[in-house]
Image (cartoon, helix red, strand yellow):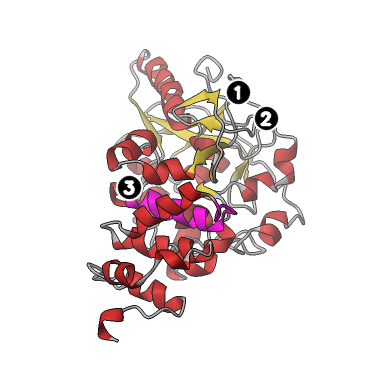
């Protein structure tokens, strides 16, 4: 069934509560390690009790789809088969968003649903859904172990997978063996995480996780901006570093790029509509494109592109943005690139107007620049 549906592995488990997962979620929430994230943290009891997915649920079929590919070149995200060349500063993108992996996973799961329904069963797809802790249910179904990098590690596919489930009222026979922990004494993901977000026991502090911070609301924390490097969306470090992934096989599908490169200057020159048309499938806080610009400006500030006249033009445009969030990060990027001349007295005055949360003022003060020249 799995291969015919375009899935790389499939297993079945019951709907008993995931007690250990619930305790872990609640404990991390108490410690504030969720960094305000909702998703399964919003209702841990529901997210770890598959029987609540619908009345009469008996089994959960859990599927994996691999997105591993050997390619690491630059590709057009709108057409992943088309390689592009970027002359200016680039931003890197996490592997799983280089093509519509979740869309393809859903198609495969719907084939499973159709098959089950042909026998008169009730079946429903549950994927990327706060009603079910997907990594925990996948481990329970014997598809892998929960690695120290917090990912599900499949013995053959590694962690380069997206996870989805089909819940059904069929009571399947279950002969699943738990996959033993394969991490052993390895600490590479913990030791080499760029912000120290993973402790030695495999507990993630989302307050430090670059992948989450790129999706979180508000400013990008100043203390992690240089660590962000060229990451525009997502961070694959804890997967790239994992020895299990060194030998992971590719899934039974056409290869797609593992990583894409985005032209940062072009992104910052784009209109709101253009940004949402091109990147709207990403998780963007409040569906507001200024968060894409925020991330891009941090990447720009980390680049070695200070001598590029096009970079100076796009910085000037961003310093004049109507959004204080964008202006504050443009200040950081401009000063990081040695463009202090872009922030003269006239610019200072306009920069600090319409700044109700004081984002721009705070950024200027962090750099030792008087935030309100009018009052001096």
Q: Which mark is residue 70?
A: 2
- For label 1, the SS is loop
Is 303 one of the magenta-colored residues? yes
Q: Where is residue 226? Give x, y as percent.
A: 57, 62
Residue at 56% over, 49% down: 235
Q: Residues within 10 Å of mark 3 (few under 14, many from 20)?
A: some
- For label 2, the SS is loop
Residue at 56% over, 38% down: 87
From what the image shows, is residue 203 above or below residue 305? below
Residues tagged 2 and 1 counted as in contact (Cβ below 8 A): yes
Bounds of the magenta span? Answer: 289-307
Q: Which mark is residue 289?
A: 3
Q: Where is residue 321? Give x, y as percent.
A: 30, 56
- For label 3, the SS is loop
Q: Which residue is mark 1?
A: 255
Give whichever of 156, 271 is nearer the camera: 271
Residue at 44% over, 66% down: 341
For the stretch drawn in magenta, the main secondary structure is helix
Going from N to C along the chain, the mark reached first, 2 or 1, is 2
Q: Is residue 19 visible?
A: no
């Amino acid at each position: 069934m799995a291969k015919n549906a375009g899935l790389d592995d499939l297993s079945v488990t019951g709907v008993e509560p995931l007690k250990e997962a619930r305790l872990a979620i609640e404990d991390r929430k108490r410690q504030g390690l969720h960094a305000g994230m909702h998703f399964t943290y919003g209702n841990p009891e529901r997210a770890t009790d598959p029987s609540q997915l619908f009345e009469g649920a008996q089994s959960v079929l859990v599927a994996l789809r691999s997105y591993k590919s050997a390619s690491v070149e630059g590709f057009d995200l709108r057409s992943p088969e088309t390689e592009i060349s970027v002359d200016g500063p680039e931003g890197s993108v996490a592997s799983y968003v280089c093509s519509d992996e979740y869309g393809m996973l859903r198609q495969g799961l719907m084939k499973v649903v159709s098959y089950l329904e042909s026998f008169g069963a009730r079946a429903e797809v549950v994927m990327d859904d706060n009603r079910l802790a997907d990594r925990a249910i996948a481990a329970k179904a014997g598809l892998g172990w929960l690695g120290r990098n917090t990912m599900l590690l499949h013995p053959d596919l590694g962690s380069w997978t997206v996870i989805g489930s089909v819940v059904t009222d069929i009571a399947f026979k279950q002969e699943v063996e738990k996959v033993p922990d394969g991490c052993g004494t390895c600490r590479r993901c913990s030791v080499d995480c760029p912000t120290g977000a993973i402790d030695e026991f495999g507990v993630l502090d989302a307050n430090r996780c670059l992948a989450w911070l790129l999706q979180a609301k508000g400013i990008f924390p100043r203390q992690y901006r240089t660590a962000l490097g060229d990451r525009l969306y997502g961070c694959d470090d804890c997967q790239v570093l994992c020895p299990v992934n060194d030998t992971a096989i590719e899934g039974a599908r056409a290869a797609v790029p593992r990583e894409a490169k985005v032209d940062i200057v072009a992104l910052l020159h784009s209109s709101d509509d253009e940004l949402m048309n091109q990147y709207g499938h990403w998780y963007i806080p409040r569906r507001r494109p200024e968060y894409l610009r925020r991330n891009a400006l941090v990447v720009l500030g980390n680049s070695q592109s200070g001598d590029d006249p096009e970079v100076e033009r796009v910085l000037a445009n961003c310093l004049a943005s109507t959004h204080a969030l964008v202006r504050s990060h443009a200040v950081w990027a401009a000063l990081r690139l040695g463009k202090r001349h872009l922030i003269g007295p006239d610019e200072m005055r306009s920069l600090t107007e319409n700044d109700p949360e004081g984002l721009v003022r705070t950024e200027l003060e962090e750099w030792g620049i008087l935030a309100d020249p009018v009052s001096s």
